[in-house]
């Protein structure tokens, strides 16, 4: 039996996919879900290594 279910993760992915530009600028871009704490750690690492 098929049922509907609202997946908020899928909703976030769809919203972010709409931001990907058409053509070459968007080639190869993929949207994925990442835990917020992992993203924050990556941002901090990027800031530390760019200095």
Image (cartoon, rainbow, N blue to C red):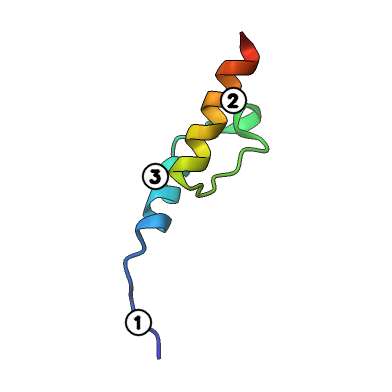
Residue 45 bears which disc, if any? 2
SS class, disc 1: loop
Residue 40 in the image: above or below residue 50: below
- Residue 20 in sight from this viewpoint: no
- CA gap between label 3 and label 2 equals 27 Å
Q: Residue, x 45% and y 49% (percent of image)?
A: 13
* Dot placed on the residue nearer the N-terminal end, 3 or 2: 3
Instruction: Please give the label number shown on residue 26.
Output: none
Q: Are marks 2 and 1 in contact (CB under 8 Å)?
A: no
Query: Is the residue marked by circle 3 packed among few (<14), some (14-19), or many (20+) residues within 10 Å?
Result: few
Q: CA distance from mark 1 to mark 3?
A: 22 Å
Relative to 6, residue 8 above or below: above
The C terminus sits in image quarter:
top right
Whichever of callouts 1 and 3 sits on the residue coming sooner in the sequence is 1
Report the mark closest to the observer, 2 or 1: 2
Element type where label 2 sits in the image: helix
Q: Are marks 1 and 3 in contact (CB under 8 Å)?
A: no
Q: Which residue is mark 1?
A: 3
Q: Earlier in the sequence, mark 2 or mark 1?
A: 1
Residue picked out by circle 3: 15
| Residue ID at (51%, 37%) | 39
Give the x, y percent position of residue 6: 32, 66
Image position, residue 11 (x, y; %):
37, 54
* Residue 51 visible (yes or no): yes
Which residue, as the protein is rendered here, is positioned at the far top?
51
Answer whether labels 3 and 2 touch (C-beta < 8 Å). no
Q: What residue do we see at 48% from left, 47% from top? A: 35
Q: Is residue 47 left or right of residue 13?
A: right
Residue 43 drawn above or below residue 14 = above
Which quadrant, please, contains the N terminus? bottom left
């Amino acid at each position: 039996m098929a049922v509907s279910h609202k997946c908020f993760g899928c909703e976030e992915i769809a919203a972010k996919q709409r931001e990907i530009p058409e053509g070459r600028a968007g080639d190869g871009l993929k949207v994925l879900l990442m835990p917020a704490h992992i993203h924050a750690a990556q941002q901090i690492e990027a800031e530390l290594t760019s200095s």
